[in-house]
Image: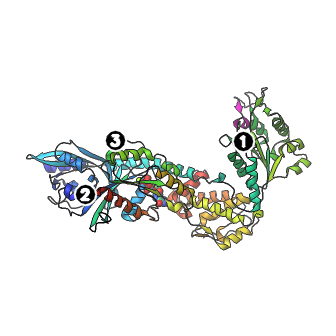
C-alpha cells in the first residue's frame, strides 16, 4: 500500500512502507537481527524485549523484476516480545503485517517446537503475507553440524519462503534475509 | 486553561496531538514534541511519519477518523530515544470532531517507568530460561560415539554393536582410569533394546563400604539404627534396564558373595527383609585394576571373577591410540568451543606435537580437561602449546601476569579452574561481568561455569 495514496499526504509517491513482524521463541536473536539490520550493531548482552519494539530502515528496491523504477521501501520492523500464549494483544500486533521473519536459534533445536502456535494465527490474520525463516547464531556451529539439516527439514513443514542461516553477531546473511523478504513482499503487493 | 491542562497531563506523562482529516498535525501539547524528539509542525508533519507503527493499520485509523471505530490502541510500544534509551508508551487514537469536521485525537502515554520495572523482572526470568535452554542443548554428545579410527577403537566399536542386544550376558570392561569405560557402558545400553529403560550406575569406590549394601540392595524399616523407613536399592531402580558397577574391585569382600548369589539366582533381599525380590537387569561391571591379581591376593572372590568374566573387553589407553589423540582432542575442542562461544579454533602443529608426545596417565578424561582449559585460554584461532597445560609439567607459564595466579600443578584441573574463577570473582568484588572480562569469557560462559562448579556467590 502506498502511503501517499492511502494517507492522502504529500509524501513522495515512490515511498512505500511495509510492516514486518519478527517472530520466534525467547533469546533466538530477533532483537539482535533487527539491531544488526538497522544499526549495524551487535550486543552480547541479552535484553528481554517487552511488548513490541519499533524501528525502521529504508531499502532502495525495484517494484518488480521487470520494472525499472526504484522505490524507497521503508520497512517498519516489529520486534515482538517472546510469545508465551497467543492473546488478543498479540493479534493486534500481527494485524496488517506485510511479512514476517520467523527466527530460530541453531544451537537450540527446541526453539522450533512452538512455531505453529504463533505462525498459524499470523497466517490466519495475514493470509497473503510472505514469511521467511532465519536460523540464527550460525557463528556458533560449524557448517557440517547436524542442526543445519534439521532446521532445513523442519522449516519445510511450514512451506514459507526460504530458510536462511544467519548470524546477527557476524552479520552473515542478515542483509540477504531482509532483502529476500522485501522482494517477496513487493511481489505479493504486485499481485 | 491549556497551561493548566498541559501541566497536569505532562505530570501524568500524557501527551496529545490532534490530526486533521488529511492526517496533518493540527495542534499538540508541548510534551508531545518532547516525547517525539523531533520538530512537529502544524499542517506539515504527518501522522504516518510520527508513528510508523501505524503502517498496516490504515483501515482502522481511517475508521477512527470517520467515527466508525471508537478507538484504536497499541500498547507497550517501545522505541529508542536520541540517547539510545528505550522509551515505552501506549498509543490511543480516538475520533474527535471540531466544528463538524472529523479529526483524530492521538493520546500518548509514556509508561517507561512502569514498563522498565516489568522489563527487569522478565529479564531475570528469561536469562535463566535462556541459560537452561542453552545448557540442555549443549550437553556434549557423549553418547554420540567413540571418536577415532585406529584399529583399537574399531575393535571397541564392533564389540559394542555385537554385544548390545545380548542382554543375558554379563560384561566386564577393563581399562586404565579415564579410558571411557563409563562411556562404553552407556553406549552398550543406548544401542540395546533397553535404551529407554533406566541406566543405573554405582561407583563402588565412592560409596563407603558400610553403606554400599543398603545402596545396592535397599533396606526395610528398622534394618539398622537410622532406617526409619524402607527404601528400595539401586538394583530395584535399574529393573528392566542396565546396572553398571564401576570399580567393582572395590566391592567389599563380604558383599561379593551376596552379589554373586544375586547374579546366579536373579533374586536378592533388602537389608532387614526376608522377602525375596526379583529384578531383571543387565549387568555391566568395570575395573581399572587387574582383577585376576586381586583374586590372587585374595581380595576378590574367584567365583565372582569367573562369573563376571564371561565377556570382557579391555579398553585401550590413550597413548595406544596414536594420532587418534588428535581426532579426540578435536572432538572436545568442538564441544568446548561451542560452550565458550568460540567458533573457529584448531590445534596448531606444535600443539598437536605436544599432545602426541605426552603419555596421558589420566587418558581421555585428562585429555578432555586439558582441552577444556586450552579452549578457555586460547585467544586466537589456534590453540598453541602454551595453552596446553599438562599435569606433569614442572611449571605453568601460559598465563599472563594480570591473570590470577594458579595454584600448584598438583591439584586437579577441575579444582584449578574452579579456583581461578573464584579468584576472578573475588577480584571483581562479585561483579560477574568484570570477572568474565578478566577471564576472557562471555558472561553466559562464566555463569555456566559458576553453575557447573557450584560456586557460591
Ligand atoms: N553468538 C551469537 N549470539 C547471538 C546471535 N544473535 C543473538 N545472540 C545472542 O543471543 C541472546 C538473545 O538475543 P536477542 O536478540 O535478545 O533474542 P530475542 O529474545 O529473540 O530478541 C543475546 O545474548 C544475543 O547477544 C548470533 O547471531 N550469534
Ligand atoms: Mg527480543
Q: How far apart are marks 2 and 3 (CA)?
A: 27 Å
Query: What is the number of the mark on residue B296?
Result: none
The residue sitting at the bottom extreme is: B350
Q: Residues within 10 Å of mark 2 (few under 14, many from 20)?
A: some
Q: Residues within 10 Å of mark 1 (few under 14, many from 20)?
A: many
Q: Quadrant of the N terminus of chain A?
A: bottom left
Q: Which residue is drawn at 76% across and 38% down?
A: B211
Q: Can residue B67 be seen in this view?
A: yes
As drawn, is B178 to the left or to the right of A185?
Answer: right
Secondary structure of the residue carrying numbered label 1? strand
Secondary structure of the residue carrying numbered label 2? helix
Query: What is the number of the mark on residue B242?
Result: 1
Q: Mark 3 points at which residue?
A: A88
User: Is the distance from the Cβ of mark 2 to the nearest ligand 2 atom less than 8 Å?
Assistant: no
Residue B82 found in image quarter: bottom left
Magenta region: B219-237
The residue sitting at the top extreme is: B274
Q: Mark 2 points at which residue?
A: B36
Secondary structure of the residue carrying numbered label 3? helix
Residue B266 percent coordinates (x, y): 79, 34
Q: Earlier in the sequence, mark 1 or mark 2?
A: 2
Chain for numbered disc 3: A
Classify B80 as above or below A88.
Answer: below
Classify A138 as above or below B74.
Answer: below
Q: Distance between the residues labelled 1 and 2?
A: 67 Å
Q: Is residue B41 inside the magenta stretch?
A: no
Amino acid at each position: 500500500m502506498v502511503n501517499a495514496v492511502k494517507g492522502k499526504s504529500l509524501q513522495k509517491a515512490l515511498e512505500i512502507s511495509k510492516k514486518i513482524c519478527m517472530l520466534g521463541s525467547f533469546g533466538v536473536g530477533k532483537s539482535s537481527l533487527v539491531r544488526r539490520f538497522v544499526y549495524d550493531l551487535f550486543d552480547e548482552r541479552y535484553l528481554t524485549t517487552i511488548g513490541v519494539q519499533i524501528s525502521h530502515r529504508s531499502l532502495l528496491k525495484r517494484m518488480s523484476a521487470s520494472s525499472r523504477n526504484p522505490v524507497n521501501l521503508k520497512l517498519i520492523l516489529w520486534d515482538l516480545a517472546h510469545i508465551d500464549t497467543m492473546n488478543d494483544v498479540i493479534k493486534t500486533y500481527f494485524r496488517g503485517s506485510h511479512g514476517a521473519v520467523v527466527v530460530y536459534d541453531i544451537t537450540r533445536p527446541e526453539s522450533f517446537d512452538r512455531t505453529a502456535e504463533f505462525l498459524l494465527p499470523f497466517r490466519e490474520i495475514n493470509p497473503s503475507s510472505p514469511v521467511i525463516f532465519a536460523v540464527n547464531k550460525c557463528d556458533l556451529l560449524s557448517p557440517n553440524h547436524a542442526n543445519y539439516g534439521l532446521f532445513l527439514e523442519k522449516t519445510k513443514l511450514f512451506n514459507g519462503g526460504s530458510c536462511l542461516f544467519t548470524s546477527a553477531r557476524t552479520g552473515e546473511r542478515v542483509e540477504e534475509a531482509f532483502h529476500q523478504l522485501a522482494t517477496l513482499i513487493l511481489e505479493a503487493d504486485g499481485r | 486553561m491549556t497551561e493548566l491542562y498541559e501541566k497536569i497531563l505532562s505530570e501524568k506523562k500524557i501527551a496529545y496531538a490532534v490530526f486533521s482529516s488529511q492526517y496533518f498535525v493540527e495542534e499538540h501539547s508541548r510534551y508531545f514534541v518532547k516525547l517525539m524528539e523531533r520538530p512537529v509542525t502544524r499542517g506539515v508533519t504527518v501522522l504516518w511519519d510520527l508513528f510508523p507503527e501505524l503502517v498496516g493499520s490504515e483501515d482502522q485509523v481511517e475508521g477512527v477518523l470517520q467515527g466508525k471505530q471508537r478507538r484504536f490502541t497499541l500498547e507497550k510500544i517501545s522505541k529508542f530515544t536520541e540517547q539510545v534509551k528505550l522509551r515505552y508508551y501506549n498509543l490511543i487514537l480516538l475520533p474527535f470532531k471540531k466544528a463538524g469536521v472529523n479529526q483524530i485525537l492521538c493520546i500518548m502515554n509514556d509508561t517507561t517507568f512502569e514498563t522498565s520495572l516489568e522489563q527487569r523482572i522478565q529479564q531475570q526470568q528469561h536469562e535463566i530460561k535462556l541459560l537452561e535452554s542453552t545448557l540442555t542443548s549443549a550437553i556434549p554428545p557423549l553418547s554420540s560415539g567413540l571418536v577415532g579410527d585406529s584399529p583399537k577403537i574399531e575393535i571397541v566399536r564392533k564389540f559394542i554393536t555385537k554385544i548390545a542386544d545380548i542382554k543375558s550376558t554379563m560384561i566386564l570392561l577393563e581399562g586404565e582410569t579415564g579410558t571411557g569405560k563409563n562411556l562404553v557402558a552407556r553406549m552398550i545400553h543406548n544401542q540395546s533394546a533397553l535404551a529407554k529403560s533406566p541406566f543405573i550406575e554405582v561407583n563402588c569406590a565412592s560409596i563407603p563400604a558400610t553403606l554400599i549394601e543398603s545402596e545396592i540392595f535397599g533396606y526395610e524399616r528398622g534394618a539398622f539404627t537410622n532406617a526409619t523407613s524402607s527404601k528400595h536399592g539401586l538394583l530395584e531402580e535399574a529393573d528392566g534396564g542396565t546396572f553398571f558397577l564401576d570399580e567393582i574391585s572395590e566391592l567389599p569382600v563380604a558383599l561379593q558373595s551376596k552379589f554373586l548369589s544375586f547374579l546366579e539366582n536373579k533374586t536378592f533381599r533388602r537389608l532387614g527383609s526376608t522377602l525375596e525380590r526379583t529384578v531383571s537387569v543387565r549387568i555391566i561391571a568395570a575395573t581399572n585394576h587387574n582383577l585376576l591379581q586381586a583374586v590372587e591376593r585374595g581380595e576378590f572372590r574367584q567365583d565372582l571373577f569367573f562369573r563376571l568374566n564371561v565377556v570382557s573387553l579391555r579398553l585401550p589407553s590413550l597413548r595406544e591410540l596414536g594420532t587418534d589423540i588428535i581426532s579426540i582432542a578435536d572432538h572436545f575442542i568442538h564441544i568446548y568451543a561451542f560452550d565458550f562461544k568460540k567458533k573457529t579454533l584448531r590445534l596448531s602443529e606444535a600443539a598437536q606435537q605436544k599432545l602426541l608426545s605426552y603419555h596421558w596417565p589420566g587418558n581421555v578424561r585428562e585429555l578432555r580437561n586439558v582441552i577444556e582449559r586450552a579452549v578457555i585460554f586460547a585467544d586466537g584461532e589456534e590453540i598453541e602449546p602454551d595453552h596446553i597445560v599438562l599435569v606433569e609439567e614442572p611449571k605453568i607459564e601460559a598465563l599472563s601476569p594480570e591473570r590470577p595466579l594458579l595454584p600448584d600443578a598438583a591439584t586437579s584441573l577441575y579444582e584449578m579452574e574452579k579456583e581461578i574463577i573464584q579468584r576472578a570473582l573475588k577480584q571483581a568484588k562479585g561483579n560477574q561481568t568484570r570477572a568474565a572480562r578478566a577471564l576472557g569469557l562471555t558472561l553466559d560462559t562464566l555463569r555456566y561455569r559458576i553453575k557447573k562448579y557450584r560456586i557460591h556467590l
